[in-house]
Image: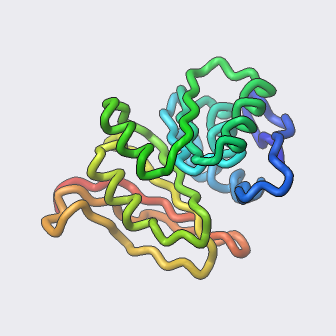
Amino acid sequence: MRIIAGTAKGRTLKSLKGMTTRPTLDRVREAVFNILGAKINNASVLDLFAGTGAIGLEALSRGAACCYFNDKNKAACRIIRENLTKCAFTQPVFILTMDALECISYLQKKGINNFDVIYLDPSYKEDIYSLLLKRILEAQLLAEEGIIIIETDKSTFLEEKYSLDQKEHQVVKLIKKNKYGDTVIWFYKLWGEE
């Protein structure tokens, strides 16, 4: 696993042997960042299930302004720190070690929001996508033009849109869906009142 492009291009990333995380494949990560293009420049990024930190590290390498890494696994967070040291980024980074839903509540409580990119890659066994999206909307973590990216396996079905309530005052809608082998990447964007 390596950084694909940007200031840290080619740097090899460390991962734990026998770790329960499932790092995003290089080719999938490359495709995601090619789709994001210039949107990643000066972006505020939240990687909610960070694992080795590959998504956030790639974002920083490509010019993201800051990145919040979260993973409930303490060993994974140690690896993220080691990878950050190896890459020597100068942008602000924050590493949180908590459950994803706790992290959303924590960020909301601290008034940390306006994320341009939120990446969700929970264990494929967890079916919490709907709950995560609703909590992100409720906490107002997404910037006005922000994008939520969800990585799933090919058997997972996600809705075209998710809303905070039945009145649909806050809605995220599917804007793009790409399949890469057994992996599917879903892109959601915030939409105003319908």
Residue 120 x %, y %: 53, 55
Residue 71 horizontal side relative to residue 23, left or right: left
Q: Nearer the viewer, residue 37 or 15?
A: 15
Tell me which colouring the rendered structure shows: rainbow
Residue 93 horizontal side relative to residue 194, left or right: right
Q: Quadrant of the C terminus?
A: bottom left
Residue 107 horizontal side relative to residue 64, left or right: left
Above or below: residue 186 compared with residue 54: below
Residue 29 x %, y %: 69, 53
Residue 175 x %, y %: 43, 63
Q: Residue furthest bottom?
A: 155
Going 54% across and 28% down the picture, which residue do you hit?
Answer: 66
Residue 164 horizontal side relative to residue 89, left or right: left
Above or below: residue 91 compared with residue 172: above
Q: Residue furthest left?
A: 167
Q: Nearer the viewer, residue 4 or 183?
A: 183
Above or below: residue 24 compared with residue 124: above
Residue 35 x %, y %: 59, 52
Above or below: residue 180 compared with residue 104: below
Q: Nearer the viewer, residue 151 or 77?
A: 77
Residue 165, quarter of picture: bottom left
Going 62% across and 78% down the picture, which residue do you hit?
Answer: 154
Going 49% across and 65% down the picture, which residue do you hit?
Answer: 176
